Image (cartoon, coloured by chain):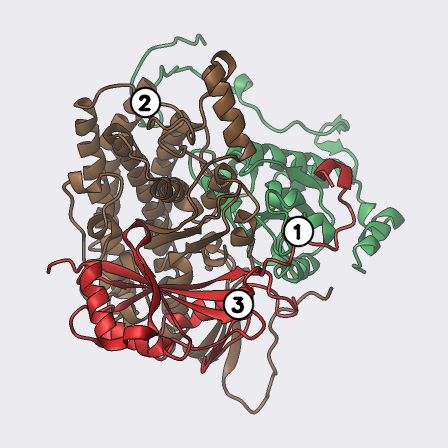
Amino acid sequence: MSYNQPVYTDNDPQSELVTLNLGPTHPATHGVFQNVLQMDGERIVSGVSTIGYIHRAFEKIAEHRPFYQITPLTDRLNYCSSPINNMGWHMTVEKLLNIQIPKRVDYLRVIIMELSRIADHIICNTIIAQDTGATTTFLYLFQYREHIYEIFEEICGARLTTNIGRIGGLERDFNDVAFAKINKFLKEFPVALREFEGLLNRNRIFIDRTKGVAEVTQENALNYSWTGPLLRATGVDYDVRISEPYSSYQDFDFEIPVGTTGDIFDRYLVRNEEMWQSVRIIEQSLEKLKSEPKGIFHADVPDFYLPGKEQVYNNMEALIYHFKIVMGEIDAPKAEVYHAVEGGNGELGFYLINDGGRSPYRLHFRRPSFINYQMYAKMSEGMLLSDAIINMSSMNIIAGELDA
Amino acid sequence: MAKATNTELIDLLGGKFGEQLFDVSEPYGLLTFSTTKDRIIDVLAFLKENGKINFNFLTDITAVHYPEKEQIAVVYHVHSMVSGIRVRVKVFLHENHPVIPTATVLWHGANWMERETYDFFGVKFEGHPDLRRILNLDDLGVHPMLKQYPLEDPNRVDKKDEFFGR
Amino acid sequence: MGRPTIPVKYCKFAACSCYYRASIFVLSMSEINIVQAPPGIEGNGFFATSLDKVIGLARSHSLWPLPFATSCCGIEFMATMGSHYDFGRFGAERLSFSPRQADVIMVMGTIAKKMGPVLKQVYLQMAEPRWVMAVGACASSGGIFDTYSVLQGIDEIIPVDVYVPGCPPRPEAILDGFQRIQDLVKNESGRRRYSPEYKELLAGYGIQ
């Protein structure tokens, strides 16, 4: 089998344009994707994107795995905010099976999803700042990602690829240490976020680098199927949490921050404001949890909910259900379902076609990074190279989600 | 803006296209119907520009392979943000000759979605500006998501079959 | 030089708030760890040891890594570089993205077959002596992705010195792997890169 060679140029000495390979390995591409750019001095004339350098064939793997083994796959889609992917997948299966989730489980899931959204936006905004040269903010805010990781460790045991939850709820309840850590995070993170904003929001150099760069109109953004903070920065207030609420988001009171011009500064501001709104949502969720009956962390669906090990070893029914579920005899209807959640980058959709067997017949992920990245080569025509670099980091392209 | 309902949409589409849409169903509240490949671009253009319920957003294009029926279904999900309604359109093609007109004339976002569908299933989109493989190696030779191809690399020599239950 | 343990909320030295009890202790010079000198002959104003050992000592504490981060393990590497786990303590503060100036290439994440030639080209551009660290299950053996498009371990194309298992490995595990590389660097003989065994190893991968 012959391997594909990296892209070479035909070095035509008569041409005045330089071919620059902003290649798969580059300090500024946050992930492995390649852009071959034709440059006229410092200005980009045209570009061609090549992706697929980390294609791991998730959709093909999903046709050979039972439902619970697909959750670790979804982890690795947008690995900066993996709990959102896990919850989205479980909610898709719950929609297929028509399971009603108790409110307390919904509120706990909302806390987890908003914490991972904060983690994702921290990475994106600090990397925008680092690419303009402001490295300090990366070090300041990454400390708070460590705190979020500690909360995830308390809830599910893992830091990054969390594999959190079950079909029908969560695998264990939040203990007191987890709630204490969440409360501590809610006290300390706003202080740090205000400090971060104080360093950058009115910083002359940052504004000069990012304002007016890579402006996108609303029609263009919708035509290219953009979603998420990128679309909201152009002015369209589309958020899956509001337009098609899932997991009881309709009970919460929060706003959708919307920009005007769609340039990089607007995207940065939209993500910052979303982090503030996420903090607000987590506070509301903790309030609502106080009025819910304690101890419920999953729906009463023993046919699909994988029971905990204490029950499996002590209880005959739990042992039988555990055996049936692991052997793959989940009695799911033969139907097709599409469910979308608001990921860190936009609308993350799961299109599941089930044929009653152990694994799905077809599972397709509608990946926001993949669809958002299409416009990049077109957008960078006429831009300076340094602007194109910051444009790429502001689009928050996660390679795992790009290639799947 | 009031949310549109599936029945309004069925009336709207039925009035314009009538018998060319078939297999109408509503799994989990999402209106799904099929059409033929000759009418698909007209249907999508009508959905986008009809003035009553404007489906301005193309969510996704993908395909499904049904080897027992010898068909490949190309599935379009479109979304109307203003009316808050989604719809799923399917086109069934024969698996030996999967050719369908491209949707890039309506939405630029269909470009990479169709390239991905071509890469995985071999569906050729007529009129696509740049139809080539996007995620797999250019010299892979096969379209891997079709059901007859295995998941694992068949050229591996270091896997012991007894450990994998073969 | 006592070590009183005082339950305080704020650590005076770092001005951070520690959740658990903090212990404030007074350090004296004999408690600070510094690098041990290699065995040698000491005299008045001179120290004689073998060149290999001195070079090994210097190299191992100033390795410049090339972070070849492809996927999730790359995010754990970013967390390792952050202030909590602080990779820079080990001399690897200066990340080199240019292979010519790098000592150790840390391959973090899944390497697909499309990426294989790129990795090989980057490895070939590195100057001797060079070391390779495979971080994570995907780089070591393909990980959970046993598919047609994923290289089942980077040791199919380049020779690897240290494998760090995990999916993703904890930052402590990455630091442990880096310390194993440091041990390899410290104890490497100066003639290793010219030896016939090394040439045979590279020839096995098709590298001249």
Amino acid type at mark 3 = Ile
- The tag on residue C12 is 2
Chain containing the residue with disc 2 = C
Q: Is residue A21 visible?
A: yes
Reading the image, the residue beneath label 3 is B134
Of the two numbered discs 2 and 3 in the rendering, the one whose residue sits closer to the viewer:
3
Which residue is at a point 50% across and 54% down the rendered structure image? A404
- Nearest the eye: A70 or B112: A70
CB within 8 Å, label 1 to label 2: no
| Rendering coords of residue A374 (x, y %) | 40, 68
Q: Name above or below for residue C139 compared with residue A325.
A: below
Of the two numbered discs 3 and 1 in the rendering, the one whose residue sits closer to the viewer:
1
Chain containing the residue with disc 1 = B
Amino acid type at mark 1 = Glu
Of the two numbered discs 1 and 2 in the rendering, the one whose residue sits closer to the viewer:
1
Q: Which chain is green?
A: C
Reading the image, the residue beneath label 1 is B152
- The tag on residue C35 is none
Q: Say which colour chain A has.
A: brown
Q: Name above or below for residue B39 compared with residue C14.
A: below
CB within 8 Å, label 3 to label 1: no
Which residue is at a point 68% across and 29% down the rendered structure image? C37
Q: In this view, which residue lies farthest toward the front?
A: B19
Mark pair 3, 1: CA separation: 20 Å
- Nearest the eye: A383 or B95: B95
Q: Name above or below for residue A307 compared with residue A219.
A: above
On the same chain: label 1 and label 2? no
Amino acid type at mark 2 = Lys
Q: Which chain is red?
A: B
Which residue is at a point 35% across and 25% down the rendered structure image? C13
Q: Is residue A35 visible?
A: no
